[in-house]
Image (cartoon, rainbow, N blue to C red):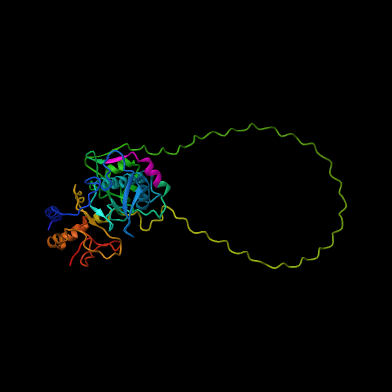
Amino acid sequence: MPRRFLAASLLAAVAMFGSGVTGQVDPAAAASCSGWTSETTPPTTIRVFRAANGAVETVDFRAYVKNVLSREWIGSWTAESLRSGAVAVKMYAWYHVLHWRGLTNASGQCFDVYDDTRDQVYNPAQATWPSAAAAVDATWATRALKNGAVYPTYYNGGTANEPCGANANGWRMYQWGTQACGLAGKTAAQILLTYYYPNWTVTNAPSPPPPTPTPTPVPTPVPTPIPTPVPTPAPPPTAAPTPPPAPPAPPAPPLPSTTPPAAPNPGAIASPDGMAGGPGGGQTAIAGLAVPPPEPSDRPVPFTVLAEGDAAEEASPLAPAYRALAGPAIRALAIQLAIPLFVGRPDPGLSRPATYPTSVVDR
């Protein structure tokens, strides 16, 4: 069955059973968890679900973007690669602040994004690289817009050392490719538009960093030679009598040999290149998709997400309907498209990362 038909079937099921549901969470705005609505000014905060304990943290938005960029991009990459990544990380998160997907934790708190590869990796226990912070600050006024509106800037890791623009499909950027673009001399805006098209624009893009000036060589002056005066011959010195040799000194007693203790070896200092396996990889659920996931509903049906390892119970009033309509193919597509349905026990027939529980029940 074609993927688009499966997606349409899944969304039709949502529409069919979405009416008449009681007990829904009603955030401050119909499609926003926090009530933020501006598409010209970045949000001041973002609500992040911490998968390890199920808590929802309200995080300063700029600090969040800097930390995520440090987890997703390699800090020693070119400044323009990091700047393109800073815009992608920011616009992806900004979109999900504006468009709530119905996500709540076990306490009923709504949130905007996960802290893992379901969205993008955020880990405040790890350092923010200075190069990443500088890239975020340089592009804070920059926006990547589709048809003039904030839109999700999806990205994946790609292949190590892949060429600039390789596999570009108009809606997803590849992290390794941005580095190749930066090495080729492209600016952050040019990199973004290499991967996001058509109808995309980049506003208020910063100028590229000025190249390091090459100093102009100054000729070394040639000194004028000074004539050497002719020395006046001096009379030969009178030989002095040679004194008798002094008696030999007694040998010094041997001293005990001591070996100084070895100096302690300081622990290795983490560097921006200390990212095992390359960049973070972005949203892993979209890695195999040919088209972007569908946009969230303006009136999403809330559902509960549990912390890692918790015994999940059905948390959506639509669970029976989904179970009845969603065959294995549609359930698998829902996971691939990152369309969360409801939280439940893991389905042994589905392939999912082990870092977080599945959101599909199959009994």
Q: Quadrant of residue 259?
A: bottom right
Q: Residue at x 12, y 62 (%)?
A: 324
In the image, residue 227 lies in the stretch drawn in magenta = no
Q: Position of residue 107 (x, y in %)?
A: 28, 57
Q: Residue at x 39, y 53 (%)?
A: 124
Please indicate, yes or no, whether residue 238 appears anywhere in the rendered image: yes
Return the residue nearer the eye: 58 or 356. 58
In the image, residue 143 lies in the stretch drawn in magenta = yes
Q: Quadrant of residue 227?
A: top right
Return the residue nearer the eye: 94 or 349. 94
Total labels: the figure holds: 0
Q: Position of residue 139 (x, y in %)?
A: 35, 41
- Toward the top, the furthest residue is 224
Please indicate, yes or no, whether residue 183 appears anywhere in the rendered image: no
In-image side of 206 versus 198 (left or right): right
Could you tell me which quadrant the C terminus lies in? bottom left
Check the image and report above or below for 38 versus 166. above
In-image side of 238 versus 101 (left or right): right
Range of the magenta residues? 132-144
Return the residue nearer the eye: 340 or 142. 340
Q: Position of residue 190 (x, y in %)?
A: 30, 41
In-image side of 167 versus 234 (left or right): left
- Toward the front, the furthest residue is 23
Q: Residue at x 68, y 67 (%)?
A: 257
